Image (cartoon, rainbow, N blue to C red):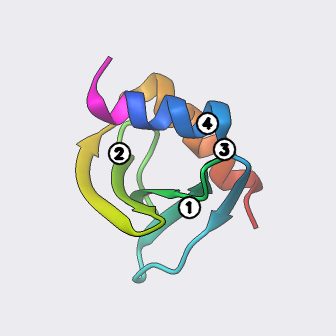
């Protein structure tokens, strides 16, 4: 499993809330709130598919990390489903 897949799996399994976050035009951005209060972000082009998702920022209480990790189609499909139902 890649780093991006690991971040996605954890967020989809334990996430408590999924929201569409602000993004520049042409970008879909998801924010998944984790049980510890951190927020994991994911992005893809709005015309992209399940293989175009990337794990980006992890905002945590008192710290944060920036990623640019690709996500495989298996986990990208889960993010696509979350994006379709997120508010």
**Which residue is disc 1 drawn over?**
31
C-beta proximity under 8 Å, tags 1 and 3:
no
- Label annotation for residue 12: 4
**Figure quadrant of residue 13:** top right
Is the C-beta separation of discs 3 and 4 under 8 Å?
yes
Residue 44 on image: x %, y %:
39, 56
Q: From the viewer's perspective, is the residue at label 1 or at label 3 nearer?
A: 3
Local packing at callout 1 (Cα closer than 10 Å; few below 14, some 14-19, many 20+) is: many
Relative height, residue 63 to residue 79 (above, below): below
Check disc 2 and report the residue beneath it: 52
Q: Which of marks 1 and 2 is in front?
A: 1
The residue beneath circle 3 is: 15
Please rate how many residues cluster around mark 4, counting C-alpha atoms within 10 Å: few if below 14, some from 14 to 19, many from 20. some
The residue sitting at the top extreme is 1
Real-space Cα distance between discs 1 and 2?
16 Å
Magenta part of the chain: 1-5
Disc on the earlier residue, 2 or 3: 3
For disc 3, the neighbor class at 10 Å (few under 14, some 14 to 19, many from 20) is many
Indicate yes or no whether the magenta region holds residue 21.
no
For marks 1 and 3, the one nearer the N-term is 3
Up the image or down, 55 lies above or below 73; here it is: below
């Amino acid at each position: 499993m890649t780093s991006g897949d690991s971040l996605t799996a954890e967020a989809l399994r334990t996430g408590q809330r999924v929201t569409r976050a602000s993004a520049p035009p042409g970008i879909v951005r998801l924010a998944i709130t984790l049980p510890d209060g951190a927020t994991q972000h994911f992005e893809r082009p709005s015309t992209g598919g399940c293989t175009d998702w990337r794990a980006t920022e992890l905002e945590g209480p008192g710290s944060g990390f920036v990623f640019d990790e690709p996500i495989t189609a298996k986990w990208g499909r889960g993010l696509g489903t979350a994006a379709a139902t997120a508010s």
